[in-house]
Image (spheres, grey):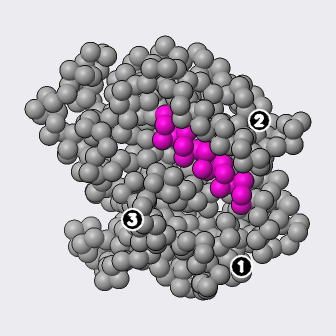
Amino acid sequence: MSVVTVQLGQCGNQIGQEVFSALCSDIRGTHGLCSKKENESYQDSCKERFFCEEESAVPVARAVLVDMEPKVISQTLSMAARSGHWKYSSHSHFCQKQGSGNNWANGYSVHGPRHKEAIMNLVQKEAEKCDRLGGFFTIMSMAGGTGSGLGAFVTQCLRDAFPTSFVLNHVIWPYGTGEVIVQNYNSVLTLSHLYHSSDALLVHENDVIHKICAQLMNIKQISFRDVNQVIAHQLGSVFQPAHTAGGGSGYSRNPLGDLMETLVPHPEFRMLGLRNIPQMPESSLPYSTFSWPGLIKHLRQMLIASAQMEEGIDWQVRPPHPSSIPSTNKPLHFNTSIANLVVLRGKDVRGVDLGSFQDPSLYTSWLNPQDAFNAWRAPRAFNKYEKSAALVSNSQFLLKPLDSIVGKAWNMFASKAYLHQYTKFGIQEEDFLDCFTTLEQVISSYTNL
């Protein structure tokens, strides 16, 4: 089944371009470490998912690009075309000249309704090119105006226009130190609206990816492109074809549907975090060897200690003892999960033992651990890594950042700072209060796991 990607705003378009580049370089690579037949079916499956073939024989990304200023879109289109290996369709982008001025209300209340028809026409055309539409994958940032405000509006339109399709929002969490003075307002408004219209939110935190670039990739001067390439690698490691547990010999049919079915058992819990292991500069790969038991042990500890990468994990955190079932006795810093998915790629994936992820003490008591944990496997290596594992987790990963962003926004709201910039576009104080209520409920639900 095919996935239509909707790239929104500067951040969404830059990351989208890196994601398609990563997918394309992976399927072109000869580093598959698997049989020729396996490699061909992997390539075909990836192309059906993310690209459509045109007469030119260059794969065309199944994507719609939206931004309120032209610069980034024209850069994105030309970078893709210059690669020579894939491109965007020349008719699937929409841009204006004026930008959203980092104001969520401007993107949501002004640009959204004004350009709804043009944007949704592009989406409709892209969806009609799919033999079987699996759903929509939107990429957006929460800090600015277009990605967040227009992104939230477009997500609602997708939900209305395609009520039976899956919608997964990939959301970039802003730097804690701040990129935009009103980023906490924009983030609260975005998250609460997406919570009503999206099937799940897959979140990457800029601070975390920045740390990975510095500490694992050894990059001295980190650019947005470096950050985006790490994000694209992590997304590719989940969305490239893999065999699901009961899927027989073929690849999973609908990556978005399978992901939701596995990870979102309850509408109150839609926040997904992503971890990936190992991660290192390409130049170090030939000198590194990994064993599956070592990778799995690290990945499990990253999960329970809520670690963001394989360096600096707190190994003291242990699951609670079965005897202490009341949640009050949970050890400090222990990260409780609702559901987890591990995706293994590369050599000898068939025999990897994942029993440690089925330990009932990792999960909330209302789901059977057999249902709460799933594994996908692909015998083909991903992106030059002989063995790699990705973890997508619906757990308390995002509780701290969510609590912090809501707290900061509330402090500004209590003193009415910058509110006039939103009220002039029709977003009233009651709208803010509704959003705070929605997110307080989410925080409370995740806290009480």
Badge 2 marks a residue whose secondary structure is loop
Q: Residues within 10 Å of mark 3 (few under 14, many from 20)?
A: some
Q: Residues within 10 Å of mark 1 (few under 14, many from 20)?
A: many
Q: Which residues are magenta?
A: 1-26
Instruction: Identify the mark nearer the N-term, 2 or 1.
Output: 2
Which residue sits at x=22%, y=68%? 328
Distance CA(mark 3)–CA(mark 1):
28 Å
Q: Which residue is mark 3?
A: 211
- The amino acid type, in three-letter code, at marker 2 is Cys
For residue 293, side relative to residue 212 (left or right)? right
Q: Which residue is mark 1?
A: 347
Name the one closer to the observer, 329 or 60: 60
Membership of 9 in magenta stretch: yes
* Circles 2, 3 touching at the beta carbon (< 8 Å): no
Residue 19 locus on image (x, y percent): 61, 50
Q: Quadrant of residue 293?
A: bottom right
Which residue sits at x=50%, y=57%? 226
Q: Residue furthest left?
A: 415
Name the one closer to the observer, 219 or 128: 219
